[in-house]
Amino acid sequence: MTSVVFVHGTGVRAKSYEKSFARVVSGLGRVRADIRVARCLWGERHGASLGLDGVSIPVRAKSRGVGGDALLDEDDPLAVWALLEVDPLAELREFAAAAKARRGQGARAGFAPGRQDPWQVVADTARGLSLEAVTGGGGNMEAVTRGEGSLEAVTGGGGSLDALVSDLAPHLRTAGGRVAQEISRTLGGTPPADGIEPIAARAVYALAVQRAEGPHGDEEPLAVDGADRDTVVGALTAQLGGRDRGGFAARAAQGIAVRALNSYLSPLSSLAHTFRGGITKGSVPASGDILRYQVRGAGVRAAIREAVRAEIASGGGPVVLLAHSLGGIACVDLLAEPDPPAGVDLLVTVGSQAPFLYELDALTALRRGEPLPAAFPRWINVYDEQDLLGFVGEKVFPDRVTDLRVNTRQPFPRAHTSYFAHQRLYELLAPELPK
């Protein structure tokens, strides 16, 4: 039986690793039942932490200054999602501002006194949104939404869409209530306007994702495939009485997103200084792991070597290293050492910077200009063009690397963390894995 050793990337610790590990087990299991997946969790022991509790971070007494004025490309279909990653309610607020402007220009409300405000109908619907349409309507989805039931009992479990619904279901009621509150507060009494349904659905989805990632954003970002996101948003939009067009806004609504993001960006620099301590501590696992690896990387490589040795000792078949991000750098360094671990038949790097670091002459075991060692195993490198941390290797190491492109349909940085929720990844890898 072929063993796939899953090596995580930067910022990952035990809780988030287990989630990713489960996705890999499920994804590979659907395409290759003969694969055994083994753990290689190095972050707990060899990852970065602030050993003095952040005393090196300066305290800013007063916030001042204004940030940049970078513009969001109105033609980018990911523009709305890039905005909602920053502020889930920004698009809804811009919609409300446009509706109020129409009222200021003399537009009539369009409903008689005593009749229910149509915006209140939308708000009430938002409070009662459910994911039953996504799961097929079976089982007790209400219990899952309350966090009291198992999604597997409702859907049968296993797919990336099921995993997303499981992550979002406990937070949907709170997210819907927050959006309903915003609709009532900002749109009550304004003239009716088309297009609120997909905007409200996206806001509910984005808020649910934000809550699922922890109150301070300290959990690893959810791995979400764009197709699954669009399925969920489409189902929420339909419940609200509208139709979502491809999971993102049409041109007019996209303009709303552009204005919202550009107005939102200006105070970011000031806010960043105000909350610098929390931001810095929160970013330590991700950025600190990279810095620590550059000078203390031997421990990470030793952990990978031991995981390979354990699989070889178990008497199994060929060993594959499946490595994400910084884990891919560590695997390339390890396999390029003079005494690489024996028995590795295939290296698969996903969203990795190893080819880029080679260009920079920043790899530990391989200098720029040196070829890969003759004993270096076959190397498949997976990347997403939206992932700014994913690089290609075919031109860096001609005839030694095969690049495979996937499209998770996610904006950066979520594109970097969503590979293992993307079923196409496993379909591409299935015929490449040794038997």
Image (cartoon, rainbow, N blue to C red):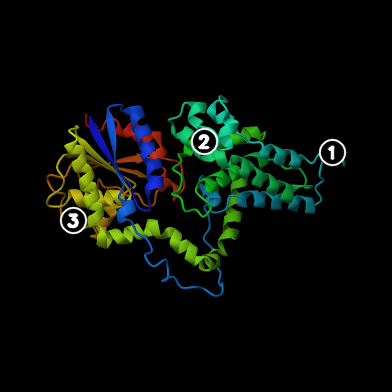
Q: Disc 3 marks which amino acid?
A: Ala
In what element is the residue under mark 2?
helix
Answer above or below: position of 90 versus 425.
below
The residue indicated by pointer 1 is 115
Spatial distance from mark 2 to mark 1, Cα to Cα? 36 Å
In what element is the residue under mark 1?
loop
Mark 2 vs mark 3: in front: 2
Which x, y percent locates residue 161?
A: 48, 33
User: Is residue 67 something that shows in the picture?
Assistant: no
Which x, y percent locates residue 391?
A: 32, 49
In what element is the residue under mark 3?
loop
Q: Is there CB contact under 8 Å for labels 3 and 1? A: no
N-terminal of the two: label 3 or label 1?
1
Q: Disc 1 marks which amino acid?
A: Arg
The residue indicated by pointer 2 is 165
The residue indicated by pointer 3 is 365
Q: Residue at x 47, y 53 (%)?
A: 218
Q: Disc 2 marks which amino acid?
A: Val
